[in-house]
């Protein structure tokens, strides 16, 4: 957390004669409370505080550590050098951004709140979905082993009775018909959850309209208020084998109803989740190579999938499916990309695990180019393949540093030109930040920043947000870092199981570790009524409500 100066407003009148540049230099060192107090003294300082440059200078100086002289010449500086490549605006104004970030960092660093742990299901939790709500947020915990989804209130650890399952979508599984599930994908849309159940038999079923897990009306039972609608596909539309992977489309809008599956039969399918109807199926493959990873960009009408062997297929021209038009394979263009060669192993070292695609992401740097980010489970490097849609040409870029361990966690953060980057955690406990530049003259691309995050094992999970980076290890520890300067803010007590997933929602952190879910909130819960005065160093965001 940056150390800022305090200002005595009684002596502020002598500052009126200072040149604007000098005044901005001084005010860039002040905390939000002092800046707001200074702006309330007279018209001169009020006008100074209404200037966005004042708040931007304070933000860059205190959170990026950029000297005032360099802030003035920022337009000529390289964003990656100063760290501004990591800046993500979440508020309309720099004033709102500065106060919001200051408050959140203060809570992460100074809060005395303790984590709350609960066990939503008596088996390993494989996926989590957090459902934000201003009073009672909910949590869906997926267990692939038990083939169920559990529901809870994470901030107090209360479990809701029963489980959602794939047989009828209800809360009490039918012992006579308990289908084995190979993949469960959950998404949140307009306050309700949608769950895709991929069966080992190849069947696909969906639970729709699962209402938000909030306290229901007194006259309603929780089960009645939250059950949702369950339906499954026809036998003619299912996969000929287990569903290996599935991903929902857009998080908002009409496209949120669509999802994609990849199967052991070597085929990819596009579905309408509302009707549980298959809209398109890829052609029958030549060999026996299942699709283990799928990615989708519905607005662009693009689907990408990776096979077990590492071959990548990209399909374009799928946008017509969202207008109700029947798709034919003749309308779809498929491009196949060979997997990048495996890096050479040091002399005497033997590969103990099969090389398999562990992550696949899509990015569009321009209208004609599709960028694919590829990660393999045993590699110290990751790869970028740029496919030109018009010409079919492919350019490949390698990222990584062989001095560090194999990649165990990765999160791409895509943004406007020149501001995309990738956060990588490795087997040795290091975290690296790589630029996702459209032109990389040196390959492999070296990291911008590397730091040791954990000393007790591999980085098994990480989550970067515009304010903090939270990392988890195979040793069960979790750490919180400043998202720009990567200064350490907070540690969570170690758990016996590795951290497998991390969710960050403002000042709420959710950790998945074995059978348990650990939740930490930086403010008391339920929150007290909002106030408009400074409390424990925080500046109420009601003071900037008109700016947002």
Image: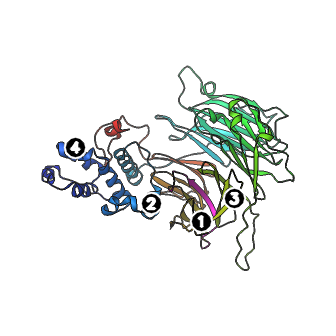
Q: Position of residue 320 (x, y in %)?
A: 70, 35
Classify 287 as above or below 215.
below
Where disc 3 sits, the SS reads strand
- Which residue lies under the disc numbered 1? 457
Taking the spot 44% from the left edge, 54% from the top edge, the residue there is: 87
The span shown in magenta is: 402-418
Which mark is nearer the camera, 3 or 4? Answer: 3
Q: Is residue 192 visible?
A: yes
Q: Earlier in the sequence, mark 3 or mark 1?
A: 3
Q: Give the Cα distance between marks 3 and 1.
A: 37 Å
Which mark is nearer the camera, 3 or 1? Answer: 3
Front residue of 118/22: it is 22
Q: Earlier in the sequence, mark 3 or mark 4?
A: 4
- Which residue lies under the disc numbered 2? 79
- Is 364 covered by the magenta stretch? no
Count neighbours of disc 2 (C-alpha within 10 A) and say few if under 14, some if 14 to 19, many if 20 or more: some
Q: Is residue 1 visible?
A: no
Where disc 1 sits, the SS reads loop
465 relative position to 200: left or right: left
Q: Give the Cα distance between marks 3 and 2.
A: 28 Å
- Which residue lies under the disc numbered 4? 46
Taking the spot 64% from the left edge, 46% from the top edge, the residue there is: 127
Which numbered tag is attached to residue 394? 3
Q: Give the Cα distance between marks 4 and 2.
A: 31 Å
């Amino acid at each position: 957390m940056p150390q800022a100066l305090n200002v005595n407003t009684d002596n502020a009148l002598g500052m009126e004669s200072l040149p604007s540049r000098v005044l901005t230099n001084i005010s860039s060192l002040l905390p939000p409370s002092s800046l707001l107090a200074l702006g309330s003294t007279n018209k001169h300082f009020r006008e100074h505080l209404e200037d966005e440059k004042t708040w931007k200078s304070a933000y860059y100086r205190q959170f990026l550590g950029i000297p005032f002289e360099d802030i003035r010449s920022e337009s000529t500086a390289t964003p990656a050098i100063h760290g501004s490549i990591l800046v993500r605006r979440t508020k309309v104004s720099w004033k709102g951004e500065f106060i919001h970030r200051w408050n959140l960092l203060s809570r992460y660093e100074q809060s005395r709140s303790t984590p709350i742990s609960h066990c939503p299901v008596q088996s390993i939790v494989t996926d989590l979905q957090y459902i934000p709500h201003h009073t009672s947020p909910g949590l869906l915990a997926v267990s692939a082993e038990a083939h169920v989804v559990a529901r809870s209130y994470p901030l107090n650890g209360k479990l809701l009775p029963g489980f959602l399952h794939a047989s009828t979508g209800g809360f009490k599984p039918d012992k006579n018909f308990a289908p084995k599930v190979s993949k469960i994908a959950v998404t949140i849309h307009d306050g309700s959850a949608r769950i895709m159940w991929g069966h080992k038999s190849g069947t696909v079923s969906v639970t729709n309209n699962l209402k938000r897990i909030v306290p229901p009306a007194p006259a309603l039972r929780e089960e009645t208020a939250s059950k949702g609608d369950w339906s499954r596909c026809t036998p003619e539309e299912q996969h000929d084998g287990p569903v290996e992977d599935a991903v929902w489309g857009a998080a908002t809008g009409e496209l949120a109803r669509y999802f994609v599956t990849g199967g052991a039969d070597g085929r990819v399918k596009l579905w309408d989740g509302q009707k549980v109807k298959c809209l398109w199926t890829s052609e029958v493959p030549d060999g026996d190579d299942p699709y283990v990873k799928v990615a989708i960009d519905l607005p662009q009408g693009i689907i990408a999938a990776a096979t077990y062997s590492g071959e990548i297929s990209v399909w374009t021209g799928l946008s017509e499916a969202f207008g109700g038009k029947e798709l034919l394979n003749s309308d779809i263009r498929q491009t196949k990309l060979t997997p990048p060669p495996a890096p050479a192993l040091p002399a005497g070292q033997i590969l103990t695990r099969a090389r398999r695609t562990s992550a696949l992401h899509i990015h569009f740097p321009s209208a004609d180019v599709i960028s694919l980010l590829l990660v393999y489970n045993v590699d110290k490097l990751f790869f970028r393949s740029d496919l030109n849609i018009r010409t079919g040409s492919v350019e490949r870029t390698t990222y990584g540093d062989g001095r560090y361990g194999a990649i165990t966690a990765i999160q791409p953060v895509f943004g406007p030109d020149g501001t995309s980057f990738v956060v990588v955690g490795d087997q040795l406990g290091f975290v690296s930040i790589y630029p996702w530049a459209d032109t990389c003259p040196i390959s492999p691309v070296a990291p911008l920043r590397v730091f040791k995050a954990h000393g007790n094992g591999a980085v098994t999970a990480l989550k970067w947000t515009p304010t903090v980076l939270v990392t988890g290890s195979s040793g069960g520890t979790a750490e919180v870092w400043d998202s720009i300067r990567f200064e350490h803010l907070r540690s969570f007590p170690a758990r016996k199981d590795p951290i497998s997933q991390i969710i960050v929602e403002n000042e709420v952190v959710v950790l998945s570790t074995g059978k348990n879910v650990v939740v930490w909130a930086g403010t008391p819960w339920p929150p007290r009524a909002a106030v408009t005065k400074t409390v424990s160093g925080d500046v109420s965001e009601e003071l900037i409500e008109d700016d947002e």
